Image: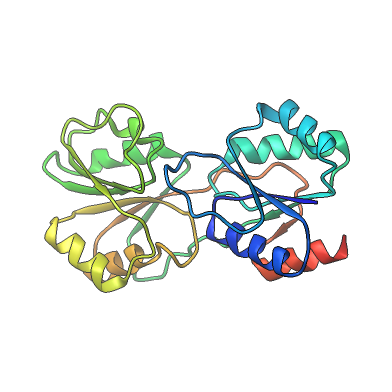
Amino acid sequence: MILVLGGTAEGRTLATELVAAGVPVTSSLAGRVAAPRLPPGEVRVGGFGGADGLAEYLAEHRISAVINATHPFAAQITANAATACARTGTPLLVLRRPPWQARDDDKWTTTPDLPAAAAALTDYAAEAVVLLTIGRQGVAAFSAAPQRFWLRSVDPPDGPLPARAEVILDRGPFTVPDERELMRRLTVDVLVTKNSGGPMTVAKLVAARELGLPVIVVDRPPLPPDMQVVDDVRGALSWAGSR
């Protein structure tokens, strides 16, 4: 039995390929999205109760390997998986899509975290319009910012919002023409996003480049040390086959 820590497009594709190959697989979803796209095979939703709970789950269900295909910003479950797998001797692989890379004609400001991204907005006037695409978590870091915000996420954002904020509920993938039109219609002055990587939401960066808009990009949290990492599903399938 392989446990896939999923919730991403890569996790769904990986589970689909494993099931098609006749490999028993359970996909674990955090449950933070109200209507997630479910992969084939067994699915469990919800947390494990920290590293201790995950270690108990691995032992109880005789998990032979874990593939962490969670979002690149899912730092807590990534740390818990590293601890639980080390404790139980369970092989662990991280499937992590490559980050986006800035081009010479991009106007990126990179920051290490969300509070730093919010601090970077002090360079913009109070009347500036910000398109915030960081998901529903972490919006509180921007709650004191004076700018006008458009918050786009799959589900309503958590925590306190900026005083001038409106929410757009939408799910990718997005196209460049649609993103370009959205930014024009909303008169966006700056885009704020996480460096999630992948094709589903990269269109916003292309649209911002074409419109000459600045982008504040939040870097990914670092992985725990000594992690074995692949950047695509093919690599994960090869690793699973070797087990």
Q: Looking at the image, which residue is at 71% across and 39% down?
A: 81
Q: Is the residue 76 above or below the residue 236 in the image? A: above
Quadrant in the rendering for residue 166: top left
Which color scheme is applied? rainbow
Answer left or right for 10 relative to 58: left
Quadrant in the rendering for residue 144: top left
Q: Position of residue 87 (x, y in %)?
A: 85, 33
User: Visible in this render: residue 50?
Assistant: yes
Q: Position of residue 3 (x, y in %)?
A: 73, 48
Q: In this rendered view, identify the residue nearer to me: 90 or 19.
A: 19
Q: Quadrant of the C terminus?
A: bottom right
Answer left or right for 2 relative to 214: right
Q: Is the residue 169 above or below the residue 15 in the image? A: above
Q: Position of residue 35 (x, y in %)?
A: 43, 47
User: Visible in this render: residue 106?
Assistant: no
Answer left or right for 29 relative to 68: left
Q: In this rendered view, identify the residue nearer to me: 141 or 199.
A: 199
Answer left or right for 1 relative to 121: right
Q: Looking at the image, which residue is at 87% across and 65% down?
A: 242
> How many marks on residues?
0
Quadrant in the rendering for residue 222: top right
